[in-house]
């Protein structure tokens, strides 16, 4: 295989039973913040 035909991983899919908890983990890990309009909706889902 040449470099142009060699398979590459382009994205990763994480499976979980609690998507909100996993998203919160990565949000904190990467130091991300909710956008102002997302704060209220994210708190209502819990």
Image: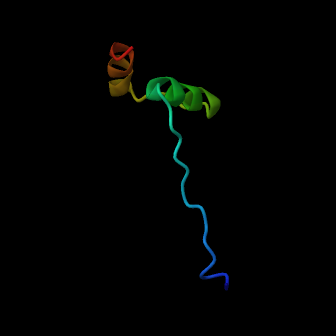
View extreme (right): residue: 2
- Picture quadrant where residue 44 is located: top left
Judge whether 12 appears above or below 46 on screen.
Answer: below
View extreme (bottom): residue: 2
Look at the image and name its color scheme.
rainbow
Indicate the quadrant containing the N terminus: top left, top right, bottom left or bottom right. bottom right
Judge whether 16 appears above or below 14 on screen.
Answer: above
The residue closer to the viewer here, 19 or 43, is 19
Q: Is residue 31 left or right of residue 45?
A: right
Q: Position of residue 7 (x, y in %)?
A: 60, 72
Q: Position of residue 20 (x, y in %)?
A: 45, 25
Judge whether 39 appears above or below 3 on screen.
Answer: above
Q: Residue at x 61, y 30 (%)?
A: 31
The residue closer to the viewer here, 45 or 2, is 2
Q: Position of residue 13 (x, y in %)?
A: 52, 46
Give the number of callouts: 0
- Picture quadrant where residue 27 is located: top right
Q: Is residue 23 left or right of residue 30?
A: left
Q: Residue at x 53, y 29 (%)?
A: 22
The residue closer to the viewer here, 13 or 30, is 13
Q: Position of residue 23 (x, y in %)?
A: 50, 30
């Amino acid at each position: 295989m040449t470099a142009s035909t060699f398979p590459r991983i382009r994205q990763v899919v994480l499976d979980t039973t609690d998507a909100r908890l996993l998203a919160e983990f990565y949000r904190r890990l990467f130091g991300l913040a909710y956008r102002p309009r997302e704060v209220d909706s994210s708190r209502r889902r819990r």
